[in-house]
Image (cartoon, helix red, strand yellow):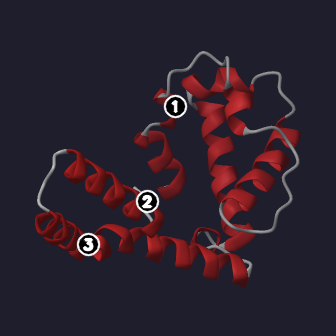
Amino acid sequence: MNITDYHFDAVLEMFQQVFNELDIHPNAITDGLAELGRCRKLITTGCTVRMEVAKKNEEMGTDMMFVKVGYGEGLEDFIKRLFDLSKVDRRLKKFFQGRDLHRIRTALRAYLTERFGGPKEYKGRELEEIHRGLGEKGSLGGCSTLQYIIRG
């Protein structure tokens, strides 16, 4: 969960309102808010760190996922494995039959490149929109399929 200082302050204000409405002694309110304030860093640090890493990656023009996958070459290998699997897996075959595979492959590469932090080149529809109405309830995105693609 991404809880920032802004969110934490809002929660503290709510606690203060509740304490006041319950007519709690002002010294107890001060002590209670101070105790809650001590855990601020524990609650907000994860979000702050993730935001700083994302900001740094954006400034560098590359995201770690794009680097980890091996830039464009690694991404192309991933897509090749996906399309190889789509030719033999009966669950996937039906979705690709009669489709322009070159166009799909090109668009998928641009989409994943952008989503993984590479250059922004995708100009198509959102994947959710493209997959809407295909009739699958998520079984295709299962770990076994992805493990095959990633590990070969």
User: From the image, which quarter does the N terminus lie in?
Assistant: bottom left
Count of numbered tags: 3
User: Which one is in front in this view, the residue at disc 1 or the one at disc 3?
Assistant: 3
| Residue hosting label 3 | 37
Amino acid type assigned to the residue bearing label 1 in the image:
Leu
Between 87 and 144, the one lying in front of the other is: 144
The mark that comes first in sequence, 1 or 3, is: 3
Point 26% across, 72% down: residue: 37
User: Which one is in front in this view, the residue at disc 1 or the one at disc 2?
Assistant: 2
**Image vertical order of residue 50 relative to residue 106, above or below:** below
**Left-right relation of 122 to 40:** right
**Left-right relation of 30 to 85:** left
Q: What's the distance in space between the residues labelled 1 and 2, CA to CA?
A: 37 Å
| Residue hosting label 1 | 140
Between 39 and 70, the one lying in front of the other is: 39
Q: Position of residue 105 (x, y in %)?
A: 79, 45
**Left-right relation of 1 to 64:** left
**Image vertical order of residue 126 relative to residue 92, above or below:** below
Point 67% across, 23% down: residue: 132
Q: Position of residue 152 (x, y in %)?
A: 51, 54
Point 74% across, 30% down: residue: 130
Between 67 and 1, the one lying in front of the other is: 1
| Residue hosting label 2 | 7
Quadrant hosting residue 55: bottom right
Q: Badge 3: how crowded within 10 Å, few (<14), some, or many (20+)?
A: some
Quadrant hosting residue 125: top right
Point 17% across, 63% down: residue: 29
Assign a secondary structure to mark 1.
Answer: helix
Amino acid type assigned to the residue bearing label 2 in the image:
His
